[in-house]
Structure formats: C-alpha cells, structure tokens
Image (cartoon, rainbow, N blue to C red):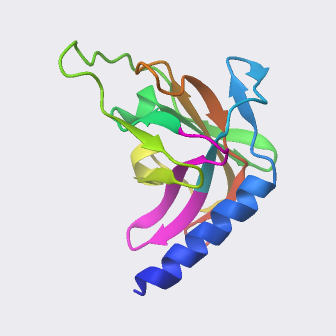
C-alpha cells in the first residue's frame, strides 16, 4: 500500500478527532491543562477488526510518555457499547514492576508528534458477536518519572464486527 497516502489519511483522522474534543481526565476530574490526546482509529484487517491507538501531543510544548504498553491491561481499558448498553468491558488490572535499572523506556513527543500501537480486538474481547458497536478506549498510566500520569479517554468510534 502507498505509505504516504495512509500517513496522510492517519494525520487527517487525528486532526479531525482531536478537533472534536477528546475528553482528557486525570483521576475522575477533567484536566484542561494536558496537551496529550488519545485517539482510537478502527482498522479492518485480514483477521478481523483492529484499533490503532495514538497518543498525540496537541500542545505547544514537549510531552513525555512511556514507550511501554505491555501488559495491555495495565495501560488500556476497552469498552464496547451496542444499542446504548455496555456489551463488553475489558478488565483493567495489571500491576507491573519495571525494576530500578534500567528505568522504563519513554519517548518525548514534540508538538504534533504521536506514538501508536495496533490492537486486535479479538485479543481483548473473546466471543465477539457480529454487529455494530461503539468502542471507547481509556489510557491510564501511573508509571515513569517525568512521564504523563493520569487517564485519557478517547471519543467513541463506530466499528462493525463481521457482516453485521
């Protein structure tokens, strides 16, 4: 596939979703000061539906984030909604220890930069039935000196599982 085309599509999606006001929270309180956004972009793959998760610096200064996302449940929670009711809610609950040496890997994002991972939904939700859903993803982090610590919630995105 054409790399430049997909990069442009990804940038347009990030800009449009960021402009729509992704909710950012720290703890249970809205955080108006952070310039870090979580964007969820559904992708159809040969083995089902995946979601591309981007942590994007939308501010005017640098933001550091962990480069670690494993185990997935320690950093992300996934919620699927169908017909206005929560259908699946991934369990959050992994405590990790990075040890003292070396400290956890982090990356510093310049304004406009992002880091992302792709997650196969069948690895998060087992026994998904065909249908239309809304997916909401939460990033939560309490690790890494000098890194963003708190909670970011994506805007819900529509996904279709199977033929629907």
Q: Is residue 105 above or below residue 48?
A: above
Which residue occupies 45% across, 65% down? 48
Taking the spot 77% from the left edge, 19% from the top edge, the residue there is: 29
State which quadrant residue 60 falls in.
Answer: top right
Q: Nearer the viewer, residue 144 or 164?
A: 144
Spot the residue most to the bottom.
2
141 vs 83: above or below? above
**Which of the pair 138/152 is nearer the observer?**
152
Q: Is residue 100 left or right of residue 23?
A: left
Where does the C terminus fall, quadrant-wise?
A: bottom right
Residue 163 colored magenta?
Answer: no
Q: Position of residue 5 (x, y in %)?
A: 51, 84
Looking at this view, name the residue that lies furthest to the top. Answer: 100
Task: In the rendered view, tell whether residue 101 sits above or below residue 82.
Answer: above
**Any part of residue 125 in sight:** no
Q: Is residue 113 visible?
A: yes
- Residue located 70% across and 62% down the image: 15
Majority secondary structure of magenta residues: strand
Is 59 one of the magenta-colored residues?
Answer: yes
> In this picture, which residue range is highlighted in magenta?
41-62
Comparing 67 with 70, the one in front is: 67
Quadrant occupied by the N terminus: bottom left
Which of these two is toward me, 41 or 29?
29
User: In this figure, what is the number of numbered marks?
Assistant: 0
């Amino acid at each position: 596939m054409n790399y430049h085309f997909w990069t442009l599509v990804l940038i347009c999606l990030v800009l449009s979703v960021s402009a729509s006001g992704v909710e950012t929270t720290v703890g249970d309180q809205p955080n108006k000061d952070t310039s870090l956004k979580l964007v969820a972009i559904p992708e159809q793959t040969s083995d089902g539906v995946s979601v591309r998760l981007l942590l994007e610096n939308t501010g005017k200064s640098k933001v550091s984030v962990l480069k670690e996302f494993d185990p997935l449940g320690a950093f992300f929670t996934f919620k699927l909604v169908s017909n206005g009711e929560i259908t699946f809610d991934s369990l959050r609950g992994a405590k990790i220890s990075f040890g003292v040496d070396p400290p956890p890997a982090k990356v510093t994002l310049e304004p406009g930069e992002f880091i992302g991972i792709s997650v196969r939904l069948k690895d998060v939700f087992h026994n998904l039935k065909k249908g239309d859903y809304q997916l909401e993803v939460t990033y939560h982090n309490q690790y890494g000196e000098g890194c963003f610590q708190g909670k970011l919630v994506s805007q819900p995105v529509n996904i279709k599982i199977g033929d629907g």
